[in-house]
Amino acid sequence: MTKPIRGFTAAHAAIAGIVATALCLMLSSPLSSRGDQVPSGCAGNGSGGNIGVLNGATHHVGDAVNFTVGIQVPAGQCQASNVTARLTFPDGTHLDYAITCPNAADPRCAPGPYTYIIRQQDLGKQTCETNLPNVFCCSPASANSVYAVATASGIDHTGPDGLDSSFADCRNLPITVLSGGLACFKACNNAVGESGLITFSGSVTNTGNTPLGPVTVSNFVNGGFVLVTNLANLNPGQTVAFSGSYLPANVCVPTTDTIFVSGFDALGSNVTSTCSATCSNIITPGIAVTKACPAAPVQPGGLLTFTGTVTNIGNITLNNVTVVDNQPVPNTPVFGPVTLAPGARATFSGSYTVPADSCGPYPDTVKATGTTTCGVGITNSFGVNCPGTNSPSIVVTKNCVSPAPQPGGTLVYSGTVTNTGNITLTNVVVVDNGPDNAGAGSGAGLHQQLHRAGQPMRINGYAYGDWRG
């Protein structure tokens, strides 16, 4: 059993599937040195130490780094004594290990592995060891790495003449810490009409310290993902633009779509980012209706036949399109219901009987209504005065009455006046030129109204009258 050391956990010696990365420390110098120096020490065959990183030299924050430790004194002339060896980490914790084991229970005798958990606060700081004899070592400081520092000191017996010397050495063990990061930006442009495509554009940036690839940019819209682009590689600090378009599933409401960016670092960890934007389809409903009168004026009591068109002049489909007329009664159905796409036009026709004994023009109004696919009602009207005509006519007859009068006697005659047209005559008057052409006669000054064609009235004299129209 290995006693836990502050900052470390003792792991099982056999770790399946892990290939050791040899970051070895040969500690064999007669002189103290800085961590970036490699002293020759004892003619290159002095005391030595081995530090192994079992699970690679590249990790993430929160990863466990597994170390194995050991120290050796080669056989031959080069021997050492009073050796102290230490492995120090960024938080100041350390592991001491022994050249020889006093007893099996001594924690310094365990080769490891020893596990150290990388912390965010370890980045950007030096790891220093100054508490061993003749040792003063500090690692570099890096925003992208953490350092373990391996140190050793002791007495090196370098030759048969009793030439002993103290030695100290240190080595930095860098662990690269991958910090993956992605940022995306997105903007969109409104579309026009129910068939308009909303367009969008944006960019994705690698905000981390390691290349990412492949990087996938997808748009989540209308309930599913649509691929925007694939990037084989995105280097730290690199920005790549993207763009696209889509037709919303529901053009009646604003649409929010979200860009999902996903990439992988060298260790296979997934890095993601999202960005969203909301845009709309600008909907403008519209309906137009026209009406045309018959080519010829309509006689009283005749059939007035009209034609017209109804057009969707908006940019959204209209459902339940109908046309009604206010003649002969309000809301008389003329056309529909139909569906009209934007720009579509339909023709219609209708007719009604104008009143008898009437004069034109005949005013009436058609009204078109519809409902957009978004449920918005719309209406428009168009009025026109259709011309009318008529055929006024009057007939007067005169009959002499037998027997013939004697000279100086009275001549009695009779007759009729008839409206033979199709319009009422008013102020009908029958006069006679009399014997003195002065209008004297039995019918002089007669005023009547003949309302219908063919209506006779017995009169004396001749007739004239007015007609309405």
Image: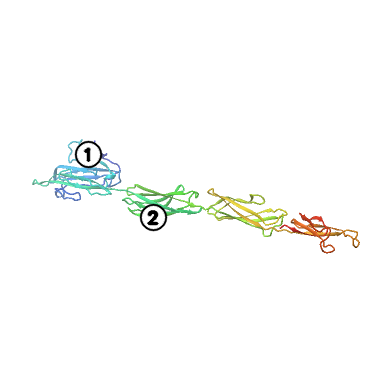
> What's the image's color scheme?
rainbow
In the image shown, does 103 or 272 lie closer to the viewer? 272
Amino acid on which disc 2 is placed:
Ala
Q: What x and y, as percent, mark residue 273?
A: 37, 48
Mark 2 secondary-structure assignment: strand
Would you name the residue on which mark 1 appears? 110
151 sits to left or right of 14: left
201 sits to left or right of 383: left
Residue 265, numbered label:
none
In the image shown, does 289 or 343 lie closer to the viewer? 289
Q: Earlier in the sequence, mark 2 or mark 1?
A: 1
Would you name the residue on which mark 2 appears? 241
Mark 1 secondary-structure assignment: loop
Query: Do residues under tags 2 and 1 come within 8 Å of each other at their CB atoms?
Result: no
Amino acid on which disc 1 is placed:
Ala
Mark 1 is surrounded, within 10 Å at the Cα level, by few (under 14), some (14 to 19) or many (20 or more) other residues, namely many
In the image shown, does 69 or 171 lie closer to the viewer? 171
453 sits to left or right of 256: right
Residue 148 falls in image quadrant: top left
Q: What x and y, as percent, mark residue 263?
A: 36, 49
Residue 311 falls in image quadrant: bottom right
